[in-house]
Amino acid sequence: MKKTKIFIACDTTNLAKVKKIINQSKTNKIKIGYKFGLEFMNSKKGRQFISTLKGKIIFVDLKLNDTVNTMISTVKALRDIKINYLTVHVSSGLAALKAVKKVSGKIKIIGVTTLTSLNNNDLKLIGYNRSVKHLVAHQ
């Protein structure tokens, strides 16, 4: 039987807190992965710390959304730290998504459609004429 896999969000720039989260979540009952966001990756020791994690499932939630070349370069720059999952915005376009997938190697790419912090009114204010539900389905 396949073990259930969950991800624990390490949404902080505090390295001591991240180490504590990882140490307190050790178990053989389920597979645990660790999600690191933009703030941790850009913290002074974040990227370096992630590169030292061995045998862990690493999910880097950067929500890349840029030009094709910038996204390709970013994925290539991340390959040395052996991450398992990476998020990119679907709205970056099909060409960008295909290009990222092509250079991602073993990194699994996860598409982000709409930020969970946005509601229907927020979408309207930034120029969308669809509800969250319909925009996500469309994307």
Image (cartoon, rainbow, N blue to C red):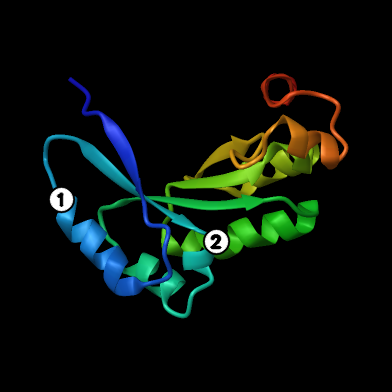
Quadrant of residue 50 within the rendered picture: bottom left
Pick out the residue farthest to the front. 121
Name the residue beneath numbered marker 2. Answer: 38
Name the residue beneath numbered marker 1. Answer: 26
Around disc 1, counting alpha carbons within 10 Å, would you say few (fewer than 14), some (14 to 19), or many (20 or more)? few
User: Residue 64, relative to residue 118: is it above or below?
Assistant: below
The residue at 72%/19% (across/down) is 134
User: Residue 39, relative to residue 107: is it above or below?
Assistant: below
The amino acid sitting under disc 1 is: Lys
Around disc 2, counting alpha carbons within 10 Å, would you say few (fewer than 14), some (14 to 19), or many (20 or more)? some
The residue at 36%/71% (across/down) is 49
User: Looking at the picture, how far across and down is residue 127, in whole percent?
Assistant: 88, 37
The residue at 58%/65% (across/down) is 77
Side (left or right) of 76 relative to 19: right
Quadrant of residue 138 within the rendered picture: top right
Side (left or right) of 72 relative to 44: right
